[in-house]
Amino acid sequence: MLPENGPQGLTETAYYLDYQGTRLISLDSQGALLDSLVLEKQANWLLDVLKNNPNRWTIVMHHHPVFSTSKGRDNDEWRDRMEPMYRKYGVDLVLQGHDHTYGRGLNMPLGKSRKQPDGPIYVVSVSGPKMYEIGLQNWMDRAASNIQLFQTIQVSQDTLKYQSYAVTGEKYDAFELIKNAKGKNRLVDHDPELPAERLELPAEYQKRNTPQQKEAYRNRFQEYKARKEAELKKNK
């Protein structure tokens, strides 16, 4: 029942649809990471889909993250091929999974204002009960561990409004992208107004991690917290 406009051999796993001024693109990262020929075929198809896009907004969806949220996980082949296209052709939002944690942010140098994104907002989320240890990497602006979430996205002519909720209904994350007449986005991050981030280790990791591993996690948390506080002061 999915669109059959993807590359040959990837029918209904890679496809796009246009809906109310937004191009929604689904990619098959699993197939691409298992076979470099599938990766290349999909990348060539995506290039055409992005270049010939009459819509004001573009959202891309795939399973494996461009930037991981979990410790010790990386998808560099996927990132190296896809991220340059996302940046060049103005992808606004990338929705991902796989890492069983939550992270939202963008790939910009530390210290540079994030109010004017020069690439897409990346989101990694988890809806089921299986949880991993979060990595707290520098690309993240909002993170979560050991929490199940779902998202809502509202799009108008000039604004993309993103909200993420815990399964209990509590709003956990929110931001807006406001697009000007030249197609450039301004990020309005609601992180300072939201409840404190939930970054406790999942119970499984609390049991099995050594004291040294727990200390390393606490150090990562403190570094992450310090970076966020510094960014907040700079962007006020």
Image: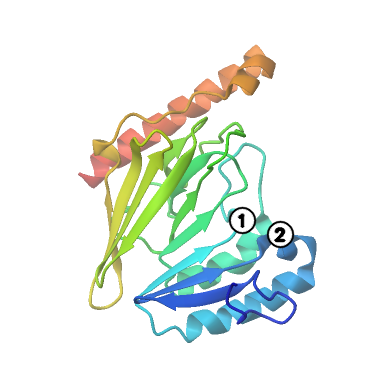
Task: Give amino acid for label 2.
Answer: Gln
Extreme residue in the left direction: 236
Q: Residue at x 24, y 70 (%)?
A: 158
Quadrant where the N terminus sits is bottom right
Q: Which one is in front, 177 or 152?
A: 152
Quadrant of the image occupied by residue 3? bottom right
* Residue behind mark 2: 30
Extreme residue in the front direction: 1
Q: Position of residue 187 (x, y in %)?
A: 29, 56
Q: Secondary structure at mark 2?
A: helix
Asked whether the residues under the numbered discs 1 and 2 touch, taking CB atoms below 8 Å apart as contact, a structural biologist would say yes
Task: Give amino acid for label 1.
Answer: His
Extreme residue in the top direction: 211
Q: Residue at x 71, y 78 (%)?
A: 41
Q: Residue at x 56, y 36 (%)?
A: 135
Q: Position of residue 85 (x, y in %)?
A: 53, 72
